[in-house]
Image (tube, rainbow, N blue to C red):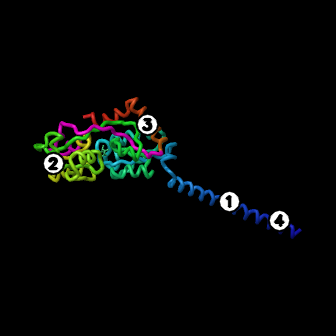
Amino acid sequence: MKNMKKIIAIIAAIAVICAVFVACSGKKTDEKSNANSANNASVSEKADEEATGGKLVMATNAEFPPYEFHEGDSIVGIDAEIAAAIAEKLGMELQIEDVSFDSIIPGVQAKKYDMGMAGMTVNEDRLKDVDFSDSYATGVQVVIVKEGSDIATVDDVAGKKIGVQTSTTGDIYATDDFGDENITRYDNGAVAVQALISGKVDCVIIDNEPAKSYVAANEGLKILDTEYVEEQYAICFNKENTELKDKVNGALKELIADGTVQKIVDKYINAD
Ligand code: GLN
């Protein structure tokens, strides 16, 4: 009888130990699998799964007012607001990454970002590397000069020192038309405009809306009446991520049709 009790006690003890062990190892397994899935999520092809919800990582270069610029700690502007409206429609959380303009397309190709939105012009070369959404805005390349400059039309730019933002269409066209030796490349439009003010270059070729804001912010500059090139802005995607591109196009179509895009543009451009 005594022995029997002992045996029962031992069995009970073993059972408790087993139960605790199973519970603990179960927990461990859960934690491990959670950690694994988190790891997998970060290394997996983010862009593909994010088309089904979750985060929408947008790369931009927030030195391009009024499309994207810093206001306090936030990045605001036409692109930022259109992207937010798109993300909302798709039930996704927008995350904006501020990077140099020339690293947007490589980052989208590497699936570091889900999309690039930066007043980015659709052109043949870029179409080889990425896909573009439908266009949501028109841009025009213009020439900024100092007031009193002897450059009166685009033709007068020939032989002058030209400032551009690296890798932009302004850079590409000006290099083609006026020769690499006449081009000085800057990280962003604001720096190029400072170079114009200090006399390092004779003009700056850049998109019309940023040009307007630079001219408004600095005395003694003007934009030539003659326009250089007209182009279309669109959002770029990894070529493999047609699912996200299609969803964004669907959202964009609705936002254009219901006047949201126009409202955002008016807020930043036409209001004044
Ligand atoms: N529209 C120009 C381009 O795509 C400039 C864009 C920009 O500087 N953000 O090259």
Secondary structure category for the residue under label 2:
loop
Q: Which residue is mark 4?
A: 8
Q: Where is 213 relative to 258, above or below? A: below
Front position in the image: 105 or 65? 105
Q: Residue at x 38, y 39 (%)?
A: 82
| Three-letter amino acid code of the residue under disc 3 | Asn
Estimate how packed mark 3 is, as few (under 14), some (14 to 19) or many (20 or more) residues with alpha carbons within 10 Å.
Answer: some
Is 250 situated left or right of 150 in this image? right
Gap in angstroms between the C-alphas marked 1 and 3: 49 Å
Of the two numbered discs 4 and 2 on the same chain, state the one appearing first in sequence. 4
In primary-sequence order, the first of circles 2 and 1 is 1
Question: On the image, numbered disc 2 is attached to which residue?
Answer: 159
Please tell me whether mark 4 or mark 2 is closer to you in this view. Answer: 2
Location of residue 10 in the rendering, given as x and y in whole percent from the top left corner: 79, 67
Q: Identify the magenta region.
A: 213-240
Q: Amino acid at mark 2?
A: Gly
Q: Secondary structure at mark 3?
A: helix
Name the residue type under label 4: Ile
Disc nearest the viewer among 1 and 3: 3
Q: Quadrant of ligand 1?
A: top left
x, y percent for residue 212: 22, 40
- Label 3 or label 2, whichever comes before in sequence order: 2
As drawn, the label of residue 249 is 3
Q: Which residue is mark 1?
A: 23
**Picture layout, residue 92 above or below residue 12:** above
Q: Nearer the viewer, mark 2 or mark 1?
A: 2
Question: Residue, x 17% and y 39% (percent of image)?
Answer: 224
User: Residue 130: x and y, percent?
Assistant: 41, 45
| Horizontal relation, residue 155 to residue 130: left or right | left
